[in-house]
Amino acid sequence: MPSPAPLLAGAMILFAALPSGPASPLRTSDAAGAVRVAHTAVHAGGPAAPAAQGAPATRSAGAGAPCRPGSGPRLAGRNLTRATLPADLSCADLRGARLDGAVVRSVLTRADLRGASLKGTRLGHAEMAGARLGKADLTEAELYYANLRGADLRGAVMDDSLPYGAHFEEADLSGATMVRAKTYGAQFDDAKLVGVDLSDADVYGADMRRADLTGLKAAKARMYGATLLRAVFRDADLRGTQLRQSAMNGATFKGADLGGADLGDVTGARLEGSKGMPKTLPAPDPACEPGSGPRFAGWDLTKVAEFPRDLSCADLTGARLEGVDLGSVKLDRAILRDIVATGATIRYAKGADLRGALLEHANFGSAELMGADLSGARMSGARFGSAKLAGANLAKAELSGASFGSADLTGARLGGADLRDTEFGSARADRADFTGARMERADLSSGEFRDAVFRGATLSGADAGFTELRGAVFAGAEVTGLDTGGAEGADLSGSSSRMAFGWVVFLSVTGLVVLWVVFKTVARARRRVRLTKAETAEQAVRFEEARGVQEENVTRLGEKIDRLADGGGGDAIDWNRALDCYDAAKEALATAQDLGDLKAVDVIVARGHNALTRPDRRTGK
């Protein structure tokens, strides 16, 4: 038989002589023959022969030192889809090679497969530790149980691939896409998956402890039962991701979006710095401390479509919940201080801290609020029908216009609360404390208020008809207009009653009207006096002016009589009448008191002037 050494040397020479580059694809007729020869020679068991000149070695000359990636057989750019490959292609240069759909049994440890096309390639159980697969196309490739420890898969396309049970320990998959990939049970310990796209992928049961998953895209991925100890999910997209029963001790989620994610029964979850409301959260410890649960302080939760069923002991300080329906959410011992929840619905909040919350027109119908702290909360118009508020603290709360029909307020504290126009019909408030509360026009009818304390409260116009008031204390209370008709055990000792507010208003208004009328009358009289004085003064001035004019007229009349008498115009003049008018004018002027008298003087003067131009009627001359 021929020695295998020459055959092996020949095969290696063929490998070395093969043209490189994409323009010269490996042909099955020549390359496959060379590969078969090499494969046969290697496994024939014959003595090893020196490698042919120019043939790359898979191992260095040193004591078992690993070969350098790409230093092995040079098959870059070759089409190997139908080639028969040797058993060992460690460190082979397969950059850009085509192996689509091929069945690969070769060892590919530290092989350089960057940019290679491995679509649908069957690589199950393949040895690919340390291989370079950057930007390789592994779409639909079978990689189950493959060994890819320390491999470089940056930017690789692995959509719809099947790497379940594969080993990716310390591998770098940054920027790779694994959409719909089946990676369940795979090992990713200490791997780098920065920016990897695992959308809709099956990753359940995978081990990702200490993995760097910064910027991971895993929306709707199935990662339940995964081991995520100390994994980094910074800025990851985990919306709708199934993470149920995963171990998360030490994992970080700063900036990660967990909206709609399933975190049921996970262990060690600390979600500080994350965003988005998960669909399900791990059940809290039944004895959890307030605020020890998930933290959503200051979050705007108005757009959350679905809340976890149990947020007991969660911290929602200052959260926005306007109009949100939390009727099915358990909020026992949760911190809800200063939340803005106008019109919200809350059903389960035993022992919750709601101090200073804005809950106007909120719906607490049939709610369980035993021991809750609602002191200082603003809840005007809120509905507490049939709610359980035994032992609750509502001191100084704003509750005007609220309704507590059939509610249980046994032992509740409402000191200093604003309860104006509040409805307590049929409520049970035995031993409740209403000290200093404002309860004007409140409806307490048919309720039970045994041993309740109304010390210093204002109950003006309130209705306590048919109410059980045995042992109730009203010392210092203002009970003006309080209706206790039909009430049992009503003892208003120490209370005070003033005139009904309506009468006070009526009398006050009446007095004001009378004062206004008196004021107007006096003012009118004074104004009339002032006007009269002004008119009198004005008339006096006009009278003096008119009297002066009439004096001149009388004087002119006398002068005219003298002038005509001296001129001898006697026969044509009625001297008697002229002189009578002159004398009458002087007398009338002397006795004149007003302008009317002066007008009479003017008439007499006119008659005198007329007599000087007419003959004496008695003589006819």
Image (cartoon, grey):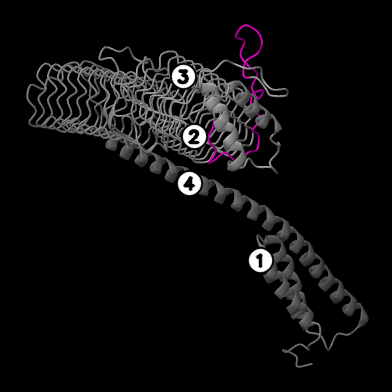
Query: What label does residue 178 carry, if any?
Result: 2
Q: Which stretch did the figure color magenta? A: 58-85
Q: Quick check: 365 left or right of 518?
A: left
Say which of marks 3 and 2 sits in front.
Answer: 2
Q: Is residue 197 visible?
A: yes
From the image, tell me which residue sits under label 3.
272
Quarter of the image with the C terminus is: bottom right
Where is residue 378? Give x, y as percent. 37, 28
**Contact, CB < 8 Å: mark 3 with mark 2?**
no
Q: Residue at x 49, y 37 (%)?
A: 121
Magenta-colored stretch includes residue 155: no
Residue at the spot of label 1:
597
Amino acid type of disc 1? Answer: Asp
Label 4, label 1: how far apart the Cα atoms are: 38 Å
Residue 604, position as x, y percentages in the image: 71, 74
Q: Which mark is residue 438?
A: none
Which dot marks residue 520?
A: 4
